[in-house]
Image (tube, grey):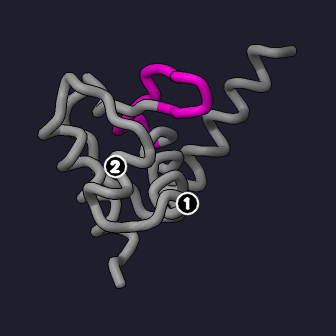
Amino acid sequence: MLGEDEIKRRIISLLQAQYPTDLSIKDIAVAIGVGRNTTSKYLAILEVQGIIRMTRKIDRAKLYRISSEPNHKILPKEEMAASIVKKRMRQLTLIT
């Protein structure tokens, strides 16, 4: 069974290798050898961290690509949670 950091590394490596092509969740899941739901979970985490971004939707399929910003690092869970809270707070501030 793959660990969380290994799954993230595989996603990042795949998207870097395929750049500038964007890939669907299904394509990524098949390529890295994990389920679609697991892949979706880690794509969301990497998107919040700014490492990847969703580029477009085709019907219900979401397509992802590596972010154009270089030198991202995989954050520990605590830092990621703080990052998610900060991003959400900024979104709420913009709404009000």
> In the rendered image of this protein, does residue 75 appear above or below residue 59?
below
Q: Which residue lies most toward the front here?
A: 59
Task: Give the CA distance from mark 1 to mark 2.
Answer: 11 Å
The magenta stretch spans residue 14: no
The magenta stretch spans residue 50: yes
| Horizontal and vertical percent position of residue 9 | 25, 58
Horizontal arrangement in the rendering, residue 24 relative to residue 44 (left or right): left
> In the rendered image of this protein, does residue 60 appear above or below residue 6?
above
Q: Residues within 10 Å of mark 1 (few under 14, many from 20)?
A: few
In which image quadrant can residue 76 be found? bottom left
- Of residues 12 and 94, the one drawn nearer to the viewer in this rendering: 12
Quarter holding the N terminus is bottom left
Q: Please, what is the three-letter code of the amino acid marked with disc 2? A: Ile
User: SS for tag 2?
Assistant: helix
Query: What's the magenta region?
Result: 49-62
Q: Which of disc 2 and disc 1 is earlier in sequence?
A: 2
| Residue at the disc numbered 1 | 37
Name the magenta segment's main secondary structure. strand
Residue 28's tag is 2
Residue 85's tag is none
- Looking at the rendered structure, the number of numbered marks drawn on it comes to 2
